[in-house]
Every structure is written in C-alpha cells, then in structure tokens.
Amino acid sequence: MKALITGASGFLGSHIVDACVRAGDEVRVLVRRRSDLSHLRTVPSVEFAYGDLRDAASLRAAVTGVDVVHHSAARATDQGTRAQFWDENVLGTRRLMAAARAAGARRFVFVSSPSALMGLNDGDRFNLDETIPYPARHLNSYSETKAAAERLVLAANRPDFTTVALRPRAVWGPRDHAGFMPRLLAKMLAGSLPDLPAGKPVYASLCYCDNAAEACARAARADGVGGRPYFVCDGPPVDLWSVLADLARRFGGTPPTRRVPRTVLNSAAFAADMLWKLPPLARHVPPPISRYTLALLTRSTTYDISAARRDLGAPWVDHETGMARLTSWIDGIGGAEVFVRKVKP
C-alpha cells in the first residue's frame, strides 16, 4: 500500500519507515526541510513531502494518493505552552485526518501514548488494559492533548475510514538521541543523576522501537481494529532503574546512590510546573523537573498487552535482544563518550 508517515525524521518515525518498507509499502514522509533527513536519505525509494501539521496545503499534497497515514509527529516534551501543545497535538491531528479522509485514504494509524491515561494523583498501577478511563485531571499539557487527539481519532472511525490508536510505552532503542533512556543514561554516566525512587523498585512496561514500528505496520492491515486503542509493550515488565544501572555498567558508569527526600522532589516539581506556565519560560526553556517526569521515573506502571498480542501479534523483539542491539549501536557510533555528546537535553 501507499503509506504516509509523519514524524519520520524523528526516532520512532524513522523506525516506522523501516517497518513499512519491510512490509512492501511505498513510503512517503512528511518532513520539514530543516529536519535531519540523513537516515531517511539512506532508505531506498522514500518519497519526500515537505510541510508540517499547521500548513493545510502541505497536508493536502502529502496525503494525495495514499492508502494509510501513520501519524507519529507530536510535541512530546515538557517544553511549550498549552496553546502550542493543543495546536500541534490536537489541531494538527484534526487537520491531517481531515485531509486524509478528503483524499480517500482508507486507514489512519495514530501513535498515541499511555501518558494519555496518566492522572495527576495516580500511584503505582499494574496490569492496566484498554478499559481504563481517561483521567479527570492530566499531569501536563502533553498528556492532556494526547488524550484529546486520541479521542478525535477513535471517534472518526467509519466503515470506509478505519482509525486505530497505538499506545507504545517509553519507546527505546537505536537512533534515539532525545528520549527518556538516552537522557537518563547520559546523566548516569556523568554521575549527575540522583536515585529518584530512593531504592524502591519502579516496574515499567517499555516498548522497543521495532515493536512499536511493527505494530504500526500491522495495524495498517489488521481486521477488527477500527475505533480501538492498543497498549504496545515488550512483554514482561522490567525494573526501570535496574535496567538503566545495568546499561550504565556496560559503558563504565556507576548507578546512582545519592538520594533526595521525596518531599523536596515533590515541592520542586510542583514549583517548576507553576513557573513553567509562564509563556516566556514555557516557550524557550525546558523545566529542570516536572510532576510528569517525576511520575514516569518513580511510579510503577505496567500494561496488559493481550489485545495487541491477539490482533497485531505483538511483541516481536524481546527485551534482551533489544538491549543487545542498543548496546551494539552505541558501540557502532563510537561508544558511550560519543553517545553522551549527541544526547539532546
């Protein structure tokens, strides 16, 4: 089929390109001219459409003649005003989906996030499935707008326009220079990361990049997925901080031992969230800490992926294999020292 992929110059988007090519699809990517296109230019036969989610004309051109849209692009950081998040994550999704329907696309695969289900006051939660409701209050603008966009996508499902939302959790793997794992690993190798959970195990369902990408390629073809969300993860949960410590040791790092009282962390995160509502800060500077980041790193959250196994066949790469591939990639780009220099704050 002919597939359009947004966010293709980013980490997960580039792996979705690879998965679609492996599946035999003709691939078009929606990218900005100023984006890093070095990997995409190595993929044979990829067609480039230049534009962005705020440019309706570029969207109409990008979706012309496509069968399926994989929508991976999003504002996915703590930096930005609520208006910026809403415009990119919600209105951008609405514009793209409207253009796709008008152009005759038959399927829309939305890369959502379990963050859409994260509530402000949640604690540890285990084995969650797709019946979990959206929270009354979200942790941040990213969570709020991913939930709003997901609702739009799922409500648009029709017999002639199949929509599906995938929720990969904490995507990791080769070619990632800005996600949670490289940033934490870089801080751990530099000795600047405290033991945030204070020795408490933090169990998490992670998602290796190829598992998330393959799920997208399968969702573009699978029957019975219309109007449904799916959690997509690697399988058995892991202790997040043990995984990071083991990875750091492979490259000569030392797991963190310095602890910060939880009351201090909570107060600092709350204060930062309040200050970063000011547009000058929110637009230009990432917060040093947030309640969202603190929740990701100190709350146990695991997911039941029975539905994804049943309808998509996920997962395909186990954690150990993924970790070996990540280690090999870091070695291949010059080792931990080069890796750390490339990590974006």
Image (tube, helix red, strand yellow):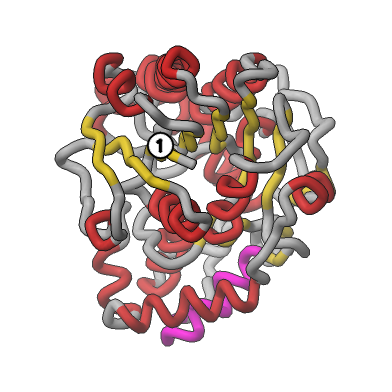
Determine whether, in the image, residue 262 is placed left or right of residue 251. Answer: right
Residue nearer the viewer, 123 or 230? 230
- Vertical arrangement, residue 264 with respect to residue 149, above or below: below
Give how far across and how far down residue 292 sits, in percent: 55, 38
Determine whether, in the image, residue 40 is placed left or right of residue 146. Answer: left
Name the residue that disc number 1 marks. 4
Boundaries of the magenta span: 240-253
Whether residue 161 is visible, yes or no, is yes
SS at circle 1: strand
The amino acid type, in three-letter code, at marker 1 is: Leu
Give how far across and how far down residue 321 sits, in percent: 60, 77
- Vertical arrangement, residue 46 with respect to residue 54, above or below: below
Residue drawn 39% across and 44% down? Answer: 288
- Does the magenta run of residues contain 14? no
Give how far across and how far down residue 294 sits, in percent: 57, 45
Q: Main secondary structure of the magenta part?
A: helix
